[in-house]
Image: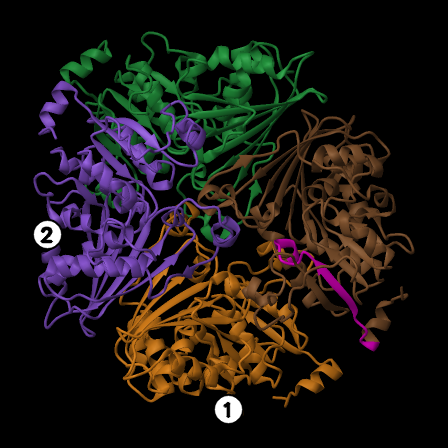
Chain colours: A orange, B purple, C green, D brown
Amino acid sequence: MHNYSFSWLMNLGHKVPVSIVGGTGYSGEALLKILLRHPAVRIDRIYGQANAGKKIGEVFPAFTGVLTTTIEQYHLTDTGSSELFFLALPSGHAMEIVPELLKANKKVIDLSGDYRLRDARIYKQYYGQAHTSHELTHEAYYGIPELDGAPGHGLSLVANPGCYPTSAILPLAPLLKEGLLKNDTIVINSLSGVTGAGKKATQEMSFAEIDSSVKAYKVTGHQHIPEIEQALSAFTGKNVSVTFTPHLIPIRRGIYTTIVADMEGSVTSADIAQTFQEYYGTKYFVRLRGEQAPEIKHVVHTNFIDIGWNVDAVKKKVILTSAIDNLIKGAAGQAVQNMNILFGLPEETALH
Amino acid sequence: MHNYSFSWLMNLGHKVPVSIVGGTGYSGEALLKILLRHPAVRIDRIYGQANAGKKIGEVFPAFTGVLTTTIEQYHLTDTGSSELFFLALPSGHAMEIVPELLKANKKVIDLSGDYRLRDARIYKQYYGQAHTSHELTHEAYYGIPELDGAPGHGLSLVANPGCYPTSAILPLAPLLKEGLLKNDTIVINSLSGVTGAGKKATQEMSFAEIDSSVKAYKVTGHQHIPEIEQALSAFTGKNVSVTFTPHLIPIRRGIYTTIVADMEGSVTSADIAQTFQEYYGTKYFVRLRGEQAPEIKHVVHTNFIDIGWNVDAVKKKVILTSAIDNLIKGAAGQAVQNMNILFGLPEETALH
Amino acid sequence: MHNYSFSWLMNLGHKVPVSIVGGTGYSGEALLKILLRHPAVRIDRIYGQANAGKKIGEVFPAFTGVLTTTIEQYHLTDTGSSELFFLALPSGHAMEIVPELLKANKKVIDLSGDYRLRDARIYKQYYGQAHTSHELTHEAYYGIPELDGAPGHGLSLVANPGCYPTSAILPLAPLLKEGLLKNDTIVINSLSGVTGAGKKATQEMSFAEIDSSVKAYKVTGHQHIPEIEQALSAFTGKNVSVTFTPHLIPIRRGIYTTIVADMEGSVTSADIAQTFQEYYGTKYFVRLRGEQAPEIKHVVHTNFIDIGWNVDAVKKKVILTSAIDNLIKGAAGQAVQNMNILFGLPEETALH
Amino acid sequence: MHNYSFSWLMNLGHKVPVSIVGGTGYSGEALLKILLRHPAVRIDRIYGQANAGKKIGEVFPAFTGVLTTTIEQYHLTDTGSSELFFLALPSGHAMEIVPELLKANKKVIDLSGDYRLRDARIYKQYYGQAHTSHELTHEAYYGIPELDGAPGHGLSLVANPGCYPTSAILPLAPLLKEGLLKNDTIVINSLSGVTGAGKKATQEMSFAEIDSSVKAYKVTGHQHIPEIEQALSAFTGKNVSVTFTPHLIPIRRGIYTTIVADMEGSVTSADIAQTFQEYYGTKYFVRLRGEQAPEIKHVVHTNFIDIGWNVDAVKKKVILTSAIDNLIKGAAGQAVQNMNILFGLPEETALH
């Protein structure tokens, strides 16, 4: 792979040719919108199964007059001339094509859950199927850039974090690592917009069923539970356990996460503020809101995560709140943020 | 007061004359709709400050052709001929008029928070003002009928429970009382429709600000925290402590509550099911949903509370979920349910 | 058939046994809710294809604890003991079973479009299939009760009007009949909630696709165009032509219709008011709003139609506006209103 | 004023200093978002009355970390160093400050209705107040760029078109000018998101009142009626008359407009397609959708207008449909488009 540097790209106008596999879902659409304004990217090919042969504007009329690419059927053996592949496929599909892509020396950023879980049995338990290329998980960089920093030299596979995990790990990780919170009393409640469920034709996702209602789902069984626990345990070196309950609410996009945890010893609100400041004070995409709870409307269509915190000093609890756009910081935006880091570009490129 | 019995009312057609003070808010509107179809009630007077002099149809065009009452200004000294008063006023106003009503031998069902908290200092702390008739709280029946049964003979003042408390107390009370849950690890997250905030002209409650967004509010400081703790402690005889976080979501009506708590010892999902069955098996308005989480759409416009539960046997946690209509089971419906009990009528009258 | 009269039913407690075929769609659900509170009706059987064998509470959890009927497969040859059948099937299905029902001396109220259009070719053109029992259309009573009065003696088949037609015909019919409007300049724009499209699992009806958007659909080709023209022409004895454009908007229920038409000669706003008063002054379910445009929220969950009108005296145009609940006055409510008339009951029974 | 050219700006990095007066409403917010990514603009000052002294991030938390300007009180006598002023004030306020700005040799783009209507009496009739500087209207460029082309040399005041007019004029103007439609049978129905009503704290704009409902408003009396008629008459040289009815629907942003008009003589669908192609074939922001009706979701957050058309050949009517984002093509986007033209920049700059 070329040793890209930002100045070179900008000066010489070289653009990285990228392909998107599964470009016709909601994450794929969000990804296309970001890549279209990315100064160092050329959208090479868009792959999609059901819509192969159609112009992108037929699937997303919003792209009419903006992007004229024809959607192609993906073939394992023809990986083409792209240097980077974004996989925006449902979980269970990336594992079928990633081995070939890596063999062909492509870089891959996988937005699905396929390469996130280090334990193949847990993958099978939560995703309901056996993994066919699980060994690659150990070569993958699981990355929330604000916590995990740059991927190592020569890395080729990024397991882009899940939407709920991003919203929960960023508020919790610094406080757990610095010993401000107990490891085993963490209660996470998340509310998600419907685009998080993907683009499906189901009765239960119809407007008439979703509007004016709310429901919890996959209680005690959501696949993001082991992802959150694994990431927090890895980051802190402790055995972190959480109770996570996702809810579906009548909004299109956005995740709102509320976390309650017991504080250790004599922790104060100021300690929490200081720890957040140390970890995130210079991170562009993390906004610290203090005692003012975040709101989804302030982050929607952006790559920001807003974090708030409130302390109950008598009960020795902290309530953490966070808001992200599930399709941006929770998927496509963070994927491009990871791409920027991987290619030596400024992290914020195309994400302002 | 007359010794009403249902059969007498039904046979002779006697109807209880009732007045509503504060009849032009969302709870007042819901109350009017229920009372209009109540076979044993005659709507006597409707009092409202800002709208005095107007026909009810001018304030609620939905009532045009259905109810023609003219809204009146309330006067402390003229309590009229009603036997029962529903107070649907913002907190802080009921305490000004209840003493006179009781002196005039009226029955009062207060939908506000004024007579719910037994400790005057806590009332002041959470409601932001001193109580002017707090001693009457000790004569009041604070009542969720499914738990607290019938009010005592000769009782005149009902402190109708709050919306969030109703949604949290009903799932928690039996499990805490029977020793299935720990007292001090309870985390309650609630999502409320906007009618819970009352009928206000504020920028922050405008459609443009609420739609497609979510926010937590009054984190660690909501006035329903002491109400929940007081009711659960009173019912169980234990010192119950909770962490409660309310959220505003873009729906008109409904409350969804998700509770996480540590289970004691070797409690199982079957134990929880059995306890719920014992307490609520014969209660018409409590529907036990088991491992199927409730949804707001199943309870909206009804007096039902739907309760679900899921056990994480490894982590020894239970996740309880409940759904109510904040204006019905969380306010006007429960008020009429309390009225029915108070007057010896079948609990479900007008609430089917 | 028995010669029912209201007083007899009420006194002796006789209840009409009714069955619903297609009881698991949105109209069927609305119908069940109304019939459950109908004092002269006993819900006999509920038929549904996909859900046969399930309890009604499994399909509509809102009915849990309220109605315990098991859904049955419909058999042409076993019409059972019901006296009346409501058909809440998609268009094209009623025509298959109505002939057998009429042979078995059942009364039928069909909520679909199958027996509304007098011209079999136009039925085929707009509904996309040939009619298999079109001759029965001529025995059917197409009825908006406020305009068409009571069905004739011995009538057995009611073609219940469509939702859009109800919202357009009621405002237009009196003004056209009395010669206040021109016949051929009528422009009708309607906005419908999504339940009007039926209960389907399609990508285009998903929350993510409907929320925050609007679209016109079936422009110039909607099947309600000939229904509106036929009904208005029949009522007025004139050749009435309309341009009708339906739109889908992000609400669950309700239809809003705005009509612009040229006024004849020197017609004034007062003339229009007077004509409406003459036709609808005593009609309970028609509310005349004058120059105050109706709003969907004032009619939702009711059988009312609210009608407003504004005159542009310079341009000699009238703008008529109407609002109904598409599932009540536009379907199930009007069906029960027709049932009440058919059985000699007060028109408002169960529809307050 | 400098004779800007795009290449010079781009090469030398000169940026036009612009100020926004009334920057804290919804149009102002949309304008700031566009200008922040405009390569040739430097946001100089933001003026606001109620919020003067606050950081922009306090009023719009979405701008936290992105823009740190402090909002200032506007003073007539201190117009500062900006070369261009965007006025995003409610109608009636621009006329107070524009005279001073023009005297100070500033360029002004006014988003309000103050300088759109050529007849001062009509301004007074529809806006409810006398104009204090109406003579400047005759110096103003009223401009929909796709129709009206570039403003003349030395022009200083742009009256940016209204949201409803933009959505109606663009579909109608070419067809009327080419004689395909009759001038006096035009019926326009528009549906608007709530941000079109501005940022107000009123009961009627609250979520609880708007959600799940629809209403027509200002029927026969909306101030955009004379604006549409004036613009169409000026463009076509004919006396164009329209009936326009606006509706409020539960979406945040977007306008959907449906127009019905009588076609002249033997006009066909192909004629209409050809005329649109001639006028708009090369216009980036106009997308011709043919018989596929546009949808708001395809244009929201963009400066596009999507236009569809359907012909009823028997009734000789055309139904035109259009969709725009009321805050972008209907306000801030078109304002920047006008700015780009005024400063010799490519029309699309910052509007992709």
In which quarter of the view is residue D235 placed? top right
Residue sitting at x 67%, y 77%:
A40
What is the chain letter for disc 2? B
Q: Which circle marks residue B25 in the picture?
A: none
**Residue beneath the point at 61% across and 77% down:** A82
Q: Which residue is mark 2?
A: B279
Which residue is at 47% across, 82% downward?
A: A277
Badge 1 density bin: few <14, some 14–19, many ≥20, Cα 10 Å: few
D150 sits left or right of B170 in the view: right
Above or below residue B236? Residue C84 is above
**Distance (Cα) linking label 1 and label 2:** 59 Å
Residue shown at 30% from the left, 55% from the top: B130
Location of residue C290 by image quarter: top right
The residue type indicated by label 2 comes to Tyr
Foreground tag (1 vs 2): 2
Q: Is residue D30 visible?
A: yes
Quarter that holds the C terminus of chain D: bottom right
Give the image location of residue A165, x and y in percent. 40, 73
**Residue B234 painted magenta:** no
* Above/below status of C180 relative to B224: above
Q: Amino acid at mark 1?
A: Gly
**Residue C101 placement (x, y as % from top left):** 29, 21
Residue, disc 1 = A152
Which residues are drawn in magenta? D12-28
* Image: B220 above or below B303: below
Is residue D21 a member of the stretch shown in magenta?
yes
Callout 1: residue from which chain?
A
Question: Does residue C59 appear anywhere in the picture?
Answer: no
Toward the viewer: A280 or C175? A280
**Residue C219 against residue B176 in the figure, above or below:** above
